[in-house]
Image (spheres, rainbow, N blue to C red):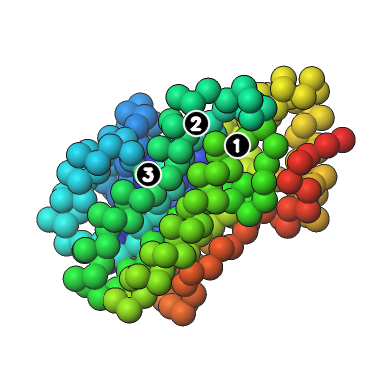
Amino acid sequence: MNRVLITAGASGIGLAMGHAFDAAGFDVWVTDVNSAALEDVPEAWTALEADASDEEVMRAVFDTIKDAGGLDVLCANAGIAGPTAALEDVELADWRTCVSINLEGAFLASKLAAPMMKGAAHGAIIFTSSTAGIYGYPNRAPYAAAKWAIIGLMKTVAMELGPHGIRANAICPGAVEGHRMEGVLEREAAAKNMTRDAVYDGYAAGTSMRSFVEAQDIANMAVFLGSQAARMVSGQVIAVDGHTENPDPKV
């Protein structure tokens, strides 16, 4: 049985990934900082409380995985939305927190997975970036910067690890229905003096599909990228976003 590790796997996109990999026959391991959410994941999964940006903690996680027999797929999924504010109003501490969790978490996970995957001469690393990693996003400077950087990290990882049979790709979700996006909508509405519904409609209108995406859409792509069906897909930036046309939603 193949093994997958999903960081921030107890809710949202990560939880959907867990269920999708489970259905595909994988042994599912998840980490999350939310201990209460971890209690609700399926009993068959291995659930570990861990801050994805804490090197000591993540080393312990990967040591445990190594002892269990190694890792076939890594979903470096941990991230936070960060502040919604004009550039001049972003506090340096908030910038650092956002970049640390989004970018350093992805770096640590891939760094620690690499030796195991090299030893096995196979593996797939799937980074969760964002359409904010493809376009600039007004009022989201820390998040956009981190998500652009994840794409650069992914492409470098793909080049370094490809000769060892290891693939790396990045999924770029658009606006995803769920609790996290609700927070973004509310903060953006306040920053632009708009209603939450008006901001929501603006995001939806900014896609050719005129719709938000579901976490399951992201999970389906992750399972494909982790499978042999994608054995020659590496170094790619794949948007699952209903085709974002307008990265600055307006009404």
Rendered position, 160 above or below 55:
below
Helix, strand or loop under label 3: helix
Q: Amino acid at mark 2?
A: Trp
Q: Earlier in the sequence, mark 1 or mark 2?
A: 2
| Dot 2 crowding, Cα within 10 Å, few <14, some 14–19, many 20+ | some
Residue 161 left/right relative to 155 = left
Q: Residue furthest front?
A: 88
Residue 105 left/right relative to 61 = right
Q: Which mark is residue 141?
A: 1
Q: Which residue is mark 2?
A: 95
Helix, strand or loop under label 2: helix
Residue 75, image x, y percentages? 40, 54
Helix, strand or loop under label 1: helix
Q: Earlier in the sequence, mark 3 or mark 1?
A: 3
Residue 210 left/right relative to 240 = right
Which image quarter is the N terminus in?
A: bottom left
Q: Which residue is mark 3?
A: 104
Instruction: Check if mark 1's residue and mark 2's residue have beta carbons within 8 Å.
Output: yes
At a point 62% along the width and 43% down the height, the residue shown is 176
